Image (cartoon, coloured by chain):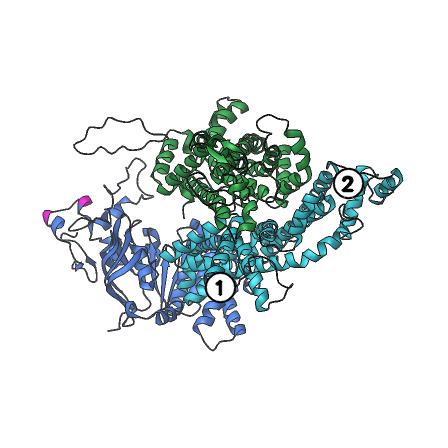
Amino acid sequence: MDTKDTNTDLNSPGAVVPDAAPSPMQTELAIEGGEEVPILGGQEKEQKKSPTPFQDSLRRLRRDKRAMVSLGIMIFFILLPIFGPLIYTHIGGTVVSPTSGTISPAAYHSPFHVELDSQDQGPSAQYWLGTDAVGRDLFARLMQGLLISISVALAVEVVDVLLGITIGVLAGFYGGWIDQLLARFTDIMFAFPGLLFAILLTGIFGYQADTIFSKIPIIGANGNARLILVSLALAMTTWPLMARYVRGQTLQLKEQQFVEAARTSGTSNTQIISRHIVPNLFSIVIIAATLNISGTIIGEAGLSFLGLGVQPPGSSLGLMINDALDLTQTHPWEVLLPSIVLTIIVLALSFLGDGLRDAFDPRSKD
Amino acid sequence: MTENLLEVNNLKTYFFTRGGVVKAVDDVTFVMKQGETLGVVGESGCGKSVTALSVMRLVANPPGKIVGGEINFNGDNILEKSMDELTDLRGSKISMIFQDPMTSLNPVFTVGYQIAETVKRHRKDISNDQAWKRSVEMLDLVRIPDPKRRAKNYPHEFSGGMRQRVMIAIALACNPQLLIADEPTTALDVTIQAQVLELMKGLSQEFGTAVMLITHDLGVVAGTCQHVNVMYAGHVVESAPVKQIFETPAHPYTVGLLQSIPRLNESRDARLTPIAGQPPDLTNPPAGCPYAPRCPKVQSRCRQERPELMPVGRGEQVAACFYPN
Amino acid sequence: MLQFLLKRLIGLIFVVLCVTFITFILGYLAPGDPIKTLLGSHFDPITYAQLRHQYGLDLPWYQQYYNFLVGLFHFDFGYSFHYQGRAVLDILSSGLPISLELGVWGLFLTILIGIPIGIFAALRANTWVDTATMGASLVLYALPTFVLAVFVQVLIVSIDGGTGVNWPVAGWGNNWQYTWSDIQFKLAPILVYAAISFAYFARLSRTTMLEVLRQDYVRTARAKGLRERVVIYKHAFRNAMIPLVTVFGLFLGLLVIGVFFIERIFNIPGIGATAIQAISDRDYPVIQATAVLGAVAVVLGNLISDLLYTVVDPRIKAE
């Protein structure tokens, strides 16, 4: 299964059955919670302000070692592609290449520089993680691929969250035709299993996207033009699920007494939504978003793997795997490197998602 | 002298949890005679349910475990029986019904099937047809109207009171010698409660079934039981025929319980007299008498030694108190 | 109950219609002129017009959609844009039995391995066995198919190298045959393919089984003197099965997508591979047909799920 946008773990909020409300979430988030601060003998402790349930959850999260390690790994994989190339392109001295003359690390440590004399090399001092079949630096390509993964994941998630929250809240709060529309739309999106819709979209409109979007500076260059289409395709498949979760949570919150109280004191609907409902969506949104990011990264890798995502000379984890697939028997390292990195990221996101869920919704524990 | 049907001696059932060892049943001793209805009363957490579950060896393990004592049923120690012998015993010689009828029946099998299943399990030579007939008979016995048709219904098609009757039907299908009823009416409406209790009383009389009725409701006990055990913090603190429990309670806890029941004939201004204090923490019970912290008649001896059940000089009545009434 | 099914059926038909419409529209809006591509750079207008007519491309879009739908009913997916004159069905038919074989095995293994493992873990909850199997399942479930496939291929290669056994890394044996040579080809792809769904089922079975074992009616079953095996496999499992049945449709979706990746990596000539080829050939009818097949499979799966659900849960009949 190559996309995790349908989180099917029964413990997850929103589960699988389309009309099920999510598992009951602690709704005390809007109400200041108190916690007894134990006063240890012999120690002076000033009375702390009682932590909010949100801070409580954060504390629970901090205590979850697996989640913290995963968070650390993710931060590493986010910082690496951003700052890595800046440093890497300055490390190493000039080298004389038979095909390109004297080149500096800015060249040979670039993900696009082809060096036909140094094909399929293992890790070395010059090429930290080796080279691929056309002599490109694998470490550089890895970082570039990670950059793509993160950018796409971020773009998709922003759309996912914005659209998901907006439609989800409206559907849950007002019901009626918005809700019906969301339900139908979700049903249809669910009928396209996993990446099928994205494959369809990128398969058919891919080339067009290449030509149109490559005109856009920075983003469009180096075979990345299609990423806009990819992001669009992935966003379209993930937002209905987010909207579903949000809708379910909104429905629950709507029935809570504090909403009734707000209503009786004359708060307008907009105010109720913005002040009472949206802040309480935080936990469910963040959990769903983390798991969605995992799905998006896999989705982008999958699409690039099938040749539908990043085009050469661009780099993507999926593309790297595809390129090295035929070399499994001779140079397994080339295919293992991106695979292992992808695995680590996905597992880290999985554990982080689990940790977040345990921290923010302890009732979902076995 | 007729042999006792059930003899529980020094039963100890502990729960090993992360927060500590909960001594839910801590040295409990009592007997039951053939055909007798015994009421076991006490507040939540006093160990009455766990005692019952221990007799059936149904205590969830982990975290619970029977760590000591013996449970003699017809002279044999249940705690020493093998799994096979135990499952033979359950449902045929000793049966149990539970508190929540809404969740105690399996939703995917018909009611008739669930009764017939017990019969088939314990009577080897019976055919499916005969088992089904017995099912229908039992449903009729527990006064389910139109039993032949209803036997083919699923639990969700019955109301709470009727489900509890079905439970009784299952429990009595093989004519057990002992029926343990763990708060059978607590989850039911008051009017239904009366009906179900009536039914149980009638059936036990008709078939000579002994009944261990666990409840926190003294009113229920008054109407149905012959003998009563009062439990507190994992111990039996008093045991007496029902009349004596109500008329001449010996243990201060029993006295307190009876006093705390609001009565219809009290004046409206009379204040309720609850028992002061809280039940003890079962992971760390106090030394001496467990009731000492709340007892109005406590003496220094009570805090040091734990009193055993002793006769108080009124026939069978025994109480675990150094200074009974 | 019949009403429930009928309602679901109508909903599903609606979904299938939308899916076919979306697939059709995407194809309709697809860039490029397929006729021009077919004819190359030199063509005369008459042939052009003829071919356009032949493919029905000169009709208005709603008529084309109608034809498309009608065609679907007859399993006529139109003609390929790339292989002139070949029916799409023809192109797909060679790959279909292969993908079906893969799919059936995937289904089979998922149920046969996933569920027992889940129950096994539930019965030994919180022991090392439980943690180990659930940990392994988590990893298998979280990994994308193609990554797992890569690892397995590397494994095969190293085993081949180390022991001299010549286990093939890619390719497919003969359809639906299982000689030793066939098994050598098919074992790895089928296992990898099924891995994700059976890992998911293992985790789900464990969760539902644990949930069920906590229920009062399990305690009642024990109190009746039923043997433990009966309590677990008859009373508990029958109830645990219910949520498993409802996700059937969903996991069929997982299998459908998995087909694309597995066939690419293991070089299996099924419809997934055909579809990928069609994508680079810009053979839209083939792509559309594959998409519709995939979506219909999911929808069918959901329908079967609903049907099974009414069978296993007597409470549904009350609706």
Tag 2 near tag 1, CB within 8 Å: no
Q: Residue at x 46, y 50 (%)?
A: C139
Percent of width and height locating residue B178: 35, 66
Magenta-drawn stretch contains B201: no
For label 1, the SS is loop
Q: Chain of mark 1?
A: C
The span shown in magenta is: B293-301
Q: How many marks?
A: 2
Residue furthest toward the left? B300
Q: Position of residue B49 (x, y in %)?
A: 32, 56
Residue B84 visible in the displayed image: yes
Q: Nearer the viewer, mark 2 or mark 1?
A: 1
Category of crowding for the residue at label 1, using alpha-carbon neighbours closer than 10 angstroms: few (below 14), some (14–19), many (at least 20):
few
**Looking at the picture, does residue C223 appear above or below residue C139?**
below
Chain C: its colour in the image is cyan
**Chain B shown in which color?**
blue
Secondary structure of the residue carrying numbered label 2: helix
Identify the mark at residue C164; answer none if there is no mark: 1
Locate residue A165 relative to residue B6 in the image: left or right. right
Does the image show residue B8? no
Amino acid at pointer 1: Gly
Q: Which mark is residue B286?
A: none
Measured from the top left, where is residue A234 in percent x and y? 59, 37
Q: Is residue B299 magenta?
A: yes
Residue bearing mark 2: C37
